[in-house]
Amino acid sequence: EESLVESGGGSVQAGGSLSLSCTASGFTFGELDDVGWYRQAPGKACQVVAVIVRSGSTYYIPSSLEGRLTLSRDDTKNTVTMQMERLKPEDTAVYHCAHDRALAPGCIEFKHWGQGIQVTVSA
C-alpha cells in the first residue's frame, strides 16, 4: 500500500547534526507535488518544519530553524532528505514526513503522512 517511510531519527547532543530521510513506498511523487516535514512535541502544537517543492525550493521554515536545515529531493528515488545542523534541545520532537499535491503550514490530513520518527537532543 501507499506509505511514507522515514529514517534517520535518534538521539544527539546539542550542537550535533542529524539527517532524516523520507521515501515513498507504493507510489511516486507527482511532478508538482510537495513533500514536507512537520514535528510535534508532547504538550505542543504540531509545527511545520519545511516544505520542499519540485524545483528544490524550500518554504515555511520557522525562524527557530532557519539556517540550520538543508533539504533535497531525488525524484528518481522518491526520496527527500533533510539535514539538520546545530541541533538544540527544543528541537526534540516526533518528526513526520508528509506528501500532497500542495502542502500547507498547518498539520492537516494530507494525502500521505509518515509514521513519525523520534528526534531527541540532549543538553
Image (cartoon, grey):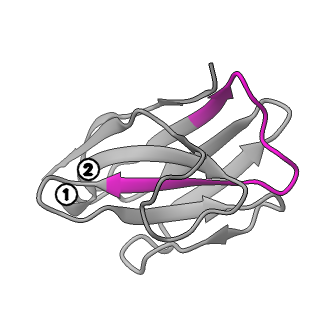
Question: What are the residue bounds of the magenta stretch?
Answer: 22-39
Residue type at numbered disc 2: Ala
Quadrant of the frame with the N terminus: top right
Disc 2 on helix, strand or loop?
Answer: strand
Give the camera-side residue of 100 and 93: 100
Horizontal and vertical percent position of residue 43: 11, 59
Q: Which numbered marker is on residue 89?
A: 1
Pointer 2 residue: 93
Query: On the rendered structure, is 68 left or right of 99?
Result: left
Residue type at numbered disc 1: Pro
Give the camera-side residue of 103 and 62: 103
Residue at 41 percent across and 70 percent down: it is: 65
Label 1 Cα neighbours within 10 Å, binned few <14 / some 14-19 / many ≥20: some
Query: On the rendered structure, is 85 left or right of 32?
Result: left
| 3 versus 71 height, above or below | above
Horizontal and vertical percent position of residue 38: 43, 56
Q: Quadrant of residue 103?
A: bottom right
